[in-house]
Image (spheres, grey):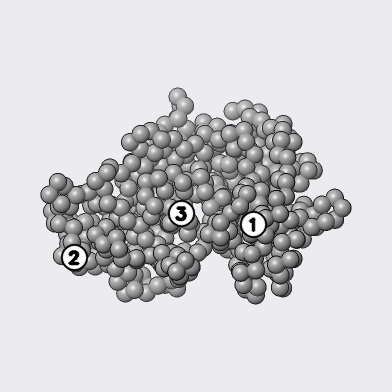
């Protein structure tokens, strides 16, 4: 293994920060507020939901500078190695003047109590950096991870439109890009502090060696879930192995008949590629947390997390995805490929052998004769956890009968799981009401769901059946609108 670097390095605005001793789970927000006294970023929920803590991170992506809004409350500071961190304090001009985003908020009366306003401003700032004239729909997406309880969003949306109308010149990124290139190296990072140790390898082989050497370590991708273990569960994680600097794990490849997603590909990066397979996958990814979560969370993390209500696994199982697991071996790396559905054994228990980690997800490209459906049911349309998620794939033969079926659900059992009895009830039938009725009747043999704070068992079973009926309607009656998003569009545009 290469010689490890023992100093964390990143830019805070234009200032170079170097930290020799750092706890592995020190959050960006706590460091900003307690160590740097930059108190503009606020703690609201401490779980990545409210957006009051939003900051913007610049990182190199294939040699180019990419700016993203993230939640500082659940992001671990050492994961910012080689990045630039921008807070609301960095927006004001040298003469103290307001940034165009801030001025637009003032002019549009977009703030009342002001507690959440810095986070809203930073979400809009990231949008301002990356897009010239965002649509109202795009603005709403960018703000979905910022919950304001007093202002209402109309003046904030108006401010977002106003901030782009002034034609303000975007900052020159070349200088920052050059400085981040100077910070980039191929040295693995090894930090220590009173709270434990933090490792950040730069190659897949280096990651495998570290996992083998520290089998008790917690692997961290975007920390959108692990961060809550610390902020809510008060857990001490030692050591932490971060996957963020392993660039090979961020690759997304089109192999013709299948797609390959590296485990560290973020939801924001995965979304447009999955959307090319089906627009329903685009809607699923649009509702995956807020934009801050999509910028940090990863496809590999969502799978390896093993949550029974994770949004992606049902869709990936329905598509026939396979998982690539890797571990250290005497001659380099040992890889194992399994169907994704076989990875989930029981609640929070996966088929991951000692030393293994998720390296990639392989998704077959659906054929032209495939019917695809994805539905997420939650109490809130944006930024909410599924009560039930259903993802279905059918292949019809030349006579219009169902030749193959994969029906996958999340929220119906201790793991994301296929509905084997319902699938069997469909095979050989024409795709019609009678087939759906038979499949719905079989669902009670497939699942005995639990009641919890999100939904009752009876509600879940009823919804699971209704989603199959929605699937039929959407594939046989395109004139019938079944989506909430579609109703919103009708209401907005008449």
Image quarter (top left, top right, bottom left or bottom right) of the C terminus: bottom left
User: Quick check: 94 above or below 42?
Assistant: above
- Nearer the N terminus, badge 1 or badge 2? 1
Residue behind mark 2: 433
**Measured from the top left, where is residue 49 in percent x and y?**
58, 63
Tag 1–tag 2 contact (CB < 8 Å): no
474 lies left or right of 101: left
Determine the residue positioned at 24% across, 59% down.
Answer: 476
Estimate the spatial distance between the alpha carbons at disc 1 and disc 3, rounded to whole Å: 18 Å
Q: Specify the farthest residue to the right.
A: 95
Q: Position of residue 481 (x, y in %)?
A: 34, 65
Q: Residue at x 56, y 41 (%)?
A: 243
The kind of secondary structure element at disc 3 is helix
Residue 374 visible in the shown view? yes
Q: Secondary structure at mark 1?
A: helix
172 is higher (above) or lower (below) than 415: above
Residue drawn at the location 59% of the way across and 61% of the way down: 143
Sequence-wise, the earlier of marks 2 and 3 is: 3
Horizontal side of 396 relative to 384 (left or right) equals left
Badge 2: few (under 14), some or many (20 or more) residues near its Cα, within 10 Å?
few
**Above or below: residue 422 compared with residue 324:** below
Q: Which residue is mark 1?
A: 123
* Distance CA(mark 1)–CA(mark 2): 46 Å
Q: Quadrant of the N terminus?
A: top right
The residue that mark 3 highlights is: 285
Residue at horizontal 73 percent and vertical 40 percent from the top? 172
């Amino acid at each position: 293994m290469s010689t490890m670097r023992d100093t964390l390095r990143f830019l805070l605005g234009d200032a170079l920060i170097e930290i020799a001793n750092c706890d592995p789970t020190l959050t960006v927000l706590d460091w900003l507020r307690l160590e740097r006294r930059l108190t503009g970023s606020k703690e609201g929920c401490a779980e990545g939901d409210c957006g009051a803590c939003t900051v913007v991170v610049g990182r190199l992506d294939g040699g180019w500078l990419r700016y993203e809004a993230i939640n500082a409350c659940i992001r671990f500071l050492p994961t910012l190695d080689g990045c630039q961190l921008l807070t609301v304090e960095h927006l004001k001009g040298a003469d103290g003047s307001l940034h165009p985003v801030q001025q637009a908020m003032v002019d549009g009366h977009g703030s009342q109590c002001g507690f959440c306003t810095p986070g809203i401003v930073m979400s809009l700032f990231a949008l301002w950096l990356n897009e010239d004239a965002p649509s109202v729909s795009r603005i709403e997406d960018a703000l979905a991870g910022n919950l304001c309880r007093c202002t209402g969003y109309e003046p904030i949306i108006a401010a977002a439109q106003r901030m782009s109308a002034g034609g303000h010149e975007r900052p020159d990124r070349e200088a920052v890009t050059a400085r981040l290139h100077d910070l980039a190296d191929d040295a693995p990072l090894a930090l220590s502090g009173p709270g434990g140790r933090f490792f950040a390898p730069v190659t897949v082989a280096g990651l495998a060696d570290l996992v083998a050497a520290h089998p008790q370590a917690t692997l961290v991708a975007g920390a959108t879930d692990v961060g809550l273990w610390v902020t809510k569960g008060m857990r001490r994680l030692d050591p932490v192995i971060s996957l963020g600097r392993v660039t090979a794990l961020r690759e997304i490849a089109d192999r013709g008949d299948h797609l390959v997603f590296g485990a560290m590909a973020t939801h924001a990066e995965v979304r447009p590629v999955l959307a090319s397979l089906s627009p329903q996958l685009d809607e699923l990814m649009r509702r995956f947390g807020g934009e801050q979560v999509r910028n940090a969370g990863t496809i590999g993390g969502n799978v390896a997390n093993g949550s029974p209500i994770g949004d992606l696994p049902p869709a990936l199982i329905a598509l026939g995805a396979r998982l690539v697991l890797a571990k250290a071996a005497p001659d380099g790396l040992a890889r194992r490929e399994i169907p994704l559905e076989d990875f989930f054994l029981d609640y929070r228990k996966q088929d991951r052998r000692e030393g293994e980690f998720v390296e990639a997800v392989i998704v077959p490209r659906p054929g032209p004769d495939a019917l695809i459906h994805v539905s997420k049911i939650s109490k809130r349309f944006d930024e909410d956890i599924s009560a039930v998620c259903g993802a279905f794939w059918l292949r019809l033969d030349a006579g219009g009968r169902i030749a193959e079926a994969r029906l996958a659900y999340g929220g119906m059992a201790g793991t994301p799981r296929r509905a084997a009895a319902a699938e069997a009830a469909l095979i050989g039938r024409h795709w019609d009401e009678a087939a759906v009725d038979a499949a719905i009747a079989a669902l009670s043999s497939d699942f005995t769901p639990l009641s919890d704070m999100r939904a009752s068992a009876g509600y879940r079973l009823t919804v699971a059946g209704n989603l199959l009926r929605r699937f039929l309607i959407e594939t046989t009656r395109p004139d019938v609108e079944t989506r909430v998003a579609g109703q919103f569009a009708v209401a907005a545009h008449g």
